[in-house]
Amino acid sequence: MISDNMKYVRDAEGYIVQPADWDENFARKLAAEEGLELDDNYWSILCFMRGYWQQNNVAPDVRHVTRHLVEAHGYDKKKAKQHLFELFPYGYVKQACKVAGMQRPRAWSTG
């Protein structure tokens, strides 16, 4: 396990161990590690993911985030998914879930 100032404990792959410990500063740190610079496009997705986690205590599947982009930003479904993967080029699980403070999702589709 990796510890960042004892507040943020991460697993060997860099995912937060306790999603409730996540905050925006930690998201910025993780994004920088991933080579991402967070802007409104990212925050819309990250805030949706956090809200979903708070309601369901599980990371949202990529289809939920795609639906959010369709409903909140007017993308068609194909464009929404394309936009998501343009923002997170190394993948939904590898980058979006990590930056949003999710534990690494196991055994479900990422696409």
Image: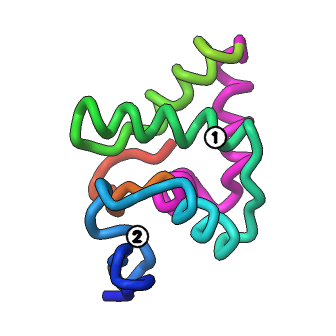
Q: Secondary structure at mark 1?
A: helix
Q: Secondary structure at mark 2?
A: loop
Q: Is residue 107 left or right of residue 40?
A: left
Residue at the spot of label 1? 43
Q: How many residues crowd mark 2 within 10 Å: few (<14), some (14–19), many (20+)? A: many
Q: Position of residue 42 (x, y in %)?
A: 67, 43
Tag 1 and tag 2, C-beta contact below 8 Å: no
Q: Is residue 11 above or below residue 20?
A: below
Q: Is residue 100 above or below residue 79?
A: below
Q: Is residue 66 left or right of residue 17?
A: right
Q: Amino acid at mark 1?
A: Trp
| Magenta stretch holds residue 82 | yes
Q: Which residues are magenta?
A: 74-99
**Residue sitting farthest toward the left:** 57
Q: Amino acid at mark 2?
A: Tyr
Q: Residue at x 64, y 33 (%)?
A: 81
